[in-house]
Amino acid sequence: MEYGAILKACRKRKGWTQEDLAHELQIEQADVSRFENDRRELPMSMFQKWAMATQSQDVLVAFIAGMDGITILANLLTTMATPITGFISFFGGLA
């Protein structure tokens, strides 16, 4: 499954360059590019590290819960402005 756009949106929401993320994950910048452009499949262990590094645990939870990629990306893009309220609205608000 292709999730490069989601990975890129997570990185951008954090305000990092590919180099910043590569440094944090201890990988090459070229690998970040390959993951974001769906030229290399991201192992689940790296997806978890990526989510933690970019403070995108909400995306990891949505993925594990079975939310489809388009829905995750749409929710991610609408929550980029405010992390706390974004996290709440990502899951449909408070009941």
Image (cartoon, rainbow, N blue to C red):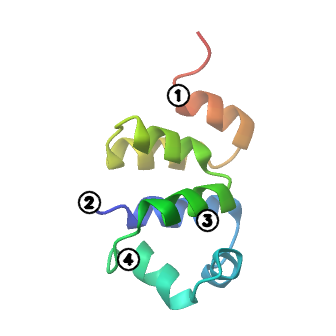
Residue placed under numbered mark 3 in the picture: 12
Mark with earlier residue (3, 2): 2
Tell me the distance, in whole angstroms, between the alpha carbons under discs 1 and 3: 20 Å
User: Which amino acid does the dot numbered 3 rest on?
Assistant: Lys
Residue placed under numbered mark 1 in the picture: 91
Q: Secondary structure at mark 4?
A: loop
Q: Nearer the viewer, mark 1 or mark 3?
A: 1
User: Which amino acid does the dot numbered 4 rest on?
Assistant: Asn
Residue placed under numbered mark 2 in the picture: 1
Image check: 15 left or right of 95? Answer: right
Expressed as whole percent of the image width and height from the top left, the position of residue 39 reads 32, 80
Tell me, yes or no, whether the two marked residues, 3 and 2, touch with CB atoms within 8 Å: no
User: Which amino acid does the dot numbered 1 rest on?
Assistant: Phe
Q: Nearer the viewer, mark 3 or mark 2?
A: 2
Q: Nearer the viewer, mark 2 or mark 4?
A: 2
Residue occupying the far front of the picture: 45
- Crowding near the residue tagged with mark 3, few <14, some 14–19, many ≥20 C-alpha atoms within 10 Å: some
